[in-house]
């Protein structure tokens, strides 16, 4: 049996967001760990790549979160679509990968290239079309660091609980659940 470890990164500001509900349905009965980025302080990047001395240490929770990311095989990014893109808190986290690329404690790209990622996103304004730039942005990010992008689900909902009316997204998470179960049992 393969020892697959799954980490979910929740990027919503809402406690019971539609994206979180959809993700929880995808992972029903599957062991996983979750980090809710709203429970962590991750400051914006101070881009000092081209300044003598480079990046300065930042007193926040980024290092704790990235260490968890590095420990897991499969990553699920669960987020709302805010203004047709990645919400600020998750974007801050991903922007800080620039620091990890230069971290002498590990080879960030080498570790990341062994990972597989999924996106579960929910939006309210024709998200299956207008959310595609968000998916494409993640594709470019994953390509850059070498992560295998295994797929995405885009749900349509705005108000809390509305995701329960998106039967297409619910069917897609059932399929993802079967895929993840099969991988875990291999």
Image (cartoon, grey):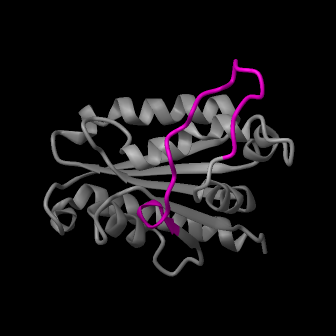
Q: Position of residue 164 (x, y in %)?
A: 20, 68
Query: In the image, residue 166 lies at what x, y percent?
Result: 20, 59
Quadrant where the C terminus sits is bottom right
**Apparent side of residue 53 relative to residue 12 in the rendered image (left or right):** right
Over which residues does the magenta segment extend? 35-57
Q: Is residue 50 left or right of residue 154?
A: right
Q: Nearer the viewer, residue 157 or 38?
A: 38
97 is higher (above) or lower (below) than 27? above
Q: What is the chief secondary structure element of the magenta stretch?
A: loop
Which sits in the foreground, 59 or 103?
59
- Residue 39 rendering spot, x and y as whole percentages: 45, 67
Q: Is residue 41 magenta?
A: yes
Q: How many discs mark residues in the rendered view?
A: 0
Check if residue 81 falls in the magenta segment: no
Q: Position of residue 85 (x, y in %)?
A: 34, 36
Instruction: From the viewer's side, name the closer residue of 62 and 119.
Output: 62
Assign the N terminus to one quadrant of the image.
Answer: bottom right
Residue at the image point whose x is 53% and y is 46% from the top: 93
State left or right for residue 149 relative to residue 99. Answer: left
Q: Is residue 121 above or below residue 159?
A: above
Residue 14: image quadrant is bottom left
At 73% from the left edge and 29% from the top edge, which residue is drawn?
54
């Amino acid at each position: 049996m393969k020892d697959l470890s799954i980490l979910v990164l929740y990027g919503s500001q809402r406690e019971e967001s539609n994206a979180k509900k959809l993700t929880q349905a995808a992972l029903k009965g599957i062991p996983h760990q979750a980090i809710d980025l709203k429970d962590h302080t991750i400051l914006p990047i101070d881009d000092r790549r081209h300044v003598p001395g480079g990046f300065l240490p930042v007193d926040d929770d980024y290092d704790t979160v990235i260490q968890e990311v590095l420990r897991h095989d499969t990553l699920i990014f669960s987020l709302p679509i805010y203004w047709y893109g990645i919400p600020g808190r998750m974007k801050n986290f991903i922007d800080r990968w620039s620091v990890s690329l230069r971290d002498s404690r590990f080879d960030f790209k080498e570790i990341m290239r062994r990972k597989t990622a999924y996106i579960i996103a929910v939006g309210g304004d024709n998200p299956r079309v207008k959310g595609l730039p968000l998916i494409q942005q993640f594709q470019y990010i994953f390509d850059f660091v070498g992560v295998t992008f295994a797929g995405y689900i885009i749900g349509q909902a705005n108000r809390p609980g509305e995701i329960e009316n998106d039967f297409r997204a619910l069917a897609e998470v059932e399929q993802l659940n079967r895929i993840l179960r099969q991988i875990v049992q291999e």
